[in-house]
Image: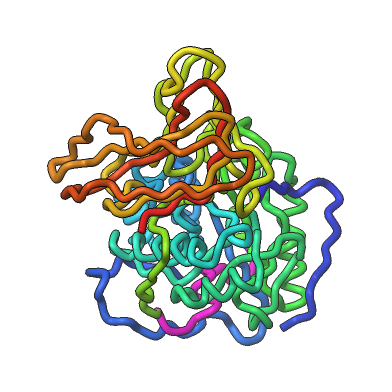
């Protein structure tokens, strides 16, 4: 999802082959069958928007004013974060006819995760959206990263489609693989109106499905920010065409299916530290405490599993000046208590550190657990803290002396 359309993109059309959502009255609302809403003798366009960014509210308003609808792929865990659409705003989008779809809990690159983590990212995200009153039917893979295993998980979690591979100008209206829908590269800062229009013209001529991908909405906010004048000019042009504009869910159709129960060996989100979010480069659902000039944190390759591990280094002073631990929140990231485990390598001994959240939302001071020896090869540290009632728990490892430690694959069992 870091790709941007550039001048001179070739239109490679595949062989031939949005209606919106309303908030459901409750997560247990009756399931319905939604028929496809595509004319049988022509092409179709879907306008899709990734990540639930705050400025997309204005993009949705521009669509609504022109009688158009779009599909907004959002993260259930970011509705309380600064710079993102909150639940009331998403509800207003749904009430206006726009579709609310899933995009994983933490913007996860699914093919790099263990299948259990994939299910947690996809199924738990869909459950979170349903708990807010939405009925998500459509999914988009972050970074357009898709694999056969990821497709299987998206299907298992109850979605009817997955927007996947980027770089193709059009998809069949009846896709060969609805869990890997093809799209052009994302519309961004360098995209011209003619380039966007060409995708629509190709869909009209070839009677195919153009699934356009948008992110941010601004004149100068990065390569994925489409210029407002370009966006609104395109919508005015599109409104004058005969080709219908439909949400992804309405093109695919099908039953609205329930989210299955998931059981995973670890209930720690982003347990393998694969997903990083924000300018500070901190893993999603994690926090750093006690940083100083003598303590640093970064992600490194050579992980125990996956692509990345986290590494802390303390060159002097109190080694607790750097603590990587599960984010202390109201439950989106902080799980309930259990037996703790993590894989690590280190040049100095390490020990668990744990804090608990009481029922009234207050976090206890950090408490130390047992010490584990330095090791040059990956070793698993495990510890079951004394039984205690806790609404949530945060834990990690800290160095007991200046040195370096690398962590990966946290778990709570």
Q: Is residue 297 above or below residue 407?
A: above
The span shown in magenta is 240-256
| Colour scheme | rainbow
Q: Residue 247 location in percent, x, y?
A: 51, 68
Q: How many marks?
A: 0
Q: Is residue 363 above or below residue 140?
A: above
Q: Nearer the viewer, residue 249 or 166?
A: 166
Residue drawn 34% across the image and 60% down it: 128
**Side of 328 relative to 293 (left or right):** left
Residue drawn 75% across the image and 65% down it: 169
Residue 394 in the magenta stretch? The answer is: no
Q: Residue 332 location in percent, x, y?
A: 33, 50
Specify whether residue 282 is in view.
yes
Q: Residue 182 location in percent, x, y?
A: 69, 68
Q: Nearer the viewer, residue 225 or 43?
A: 225
Residue 243 in the magenta stretch? The answer is: yes
Q: Is residue 155 above or below residue 370?
A: below
Residue drawn 63% across the image and 39% down it: 376
Specify whether residue 212 is in view.
no
Q: Residue 94 location in percent, x, y?
A: 37, 61
Quadrant of residue 395 in the image?
A: top left
Quadrant of residue 353 in the image?
A: top left
- Residue at the outermost front position: 373
Q: Nearer the viewer, residue 52 or 313?
A: 313
Q: Which image quarter holds the C terminus? A: bottom left
Residue drawn 48% across the image and 41% down it: 55
């Amino acid at each position: 999802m870091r790709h941007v359309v550039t001048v001179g993109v070739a239109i490679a059309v595949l062989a031939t082959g949005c209606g919106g959502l309303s908030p459901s009255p409750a997560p247990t609302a009756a399931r319905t069958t939604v028929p496809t809403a595509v004319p049988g003798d022509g092409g179709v366009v879907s306008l899709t928007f990734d990540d639930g960014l705050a400025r997309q509210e204005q993009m949705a308003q521009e669509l609504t004013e022109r009688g158009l609808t779009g599909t907004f792929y959002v993260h259930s865990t970011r509705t309380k974060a600064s710079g993102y659409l909150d639940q009331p705003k998403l509800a207003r989008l749904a009430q206006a006819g726009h579709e609310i779809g899933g995009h994983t809990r933490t913007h996860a690159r699914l093919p790099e995760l263990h299948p259990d983590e994939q299910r947690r990212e996809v199924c738990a995200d869909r459950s979170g959206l349903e708990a807010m009153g939405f009925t998500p039917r459509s999914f988009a893979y972050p970074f357009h990263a898709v694999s056969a295993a990821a497709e299987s998980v998206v299907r298992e979690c109850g979605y009817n489609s997955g927007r996947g591979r980027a770089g193709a100008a059009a998809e069949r209206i009846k896709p060969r693989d609805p869990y890997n829908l093809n799209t052009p590269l994302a519309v961004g800062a360098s995209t011209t109106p003619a380039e966007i229009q060409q995708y629509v013209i190709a869909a009209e001529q070839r009677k195919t499905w153009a699934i356009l991908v948008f992110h941010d909405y601004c004149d100068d906010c990065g390569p994925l920010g489409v210029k407002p004048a370009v966006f609104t000019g395109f919508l005015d042009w599109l409104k004058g065409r005969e080709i219908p504009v439909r949400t992804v869910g309405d093109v695919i159709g099908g039953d609205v299916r329930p989210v299955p129960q998931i059981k995973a060996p670890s209930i720690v989100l982003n347990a393998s530290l694969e997903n990083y979010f924000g300018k500070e480069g901190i893993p999603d659902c994690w926090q750093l405490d006690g940083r100083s000039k003598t303590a640093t944190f970064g992600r490194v390759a050579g992980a125990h599993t996956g692509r990345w591990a986290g590494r802390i280094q303390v060159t002097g002073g109190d080694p607790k000046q750097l603590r990587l631990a599960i984010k202390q929140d109201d439950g989106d990231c902080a799980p309930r208590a259990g037996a703790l485990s993590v894989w690590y390598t280190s040049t100095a001994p390490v020990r668990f550190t744990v804090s608990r959240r009481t029922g009234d939302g207050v976090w206890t001071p950090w408490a130390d657990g047992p010490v584990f020896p330095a090791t040059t090869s990956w070793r698993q540290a495990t510890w079951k803290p004394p039984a205690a009632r806790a609404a949530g728990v945060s834990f990690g490892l800290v160095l007991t002396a200046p040195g370096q430690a690398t962590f990966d694959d946290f778990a709570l069992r």
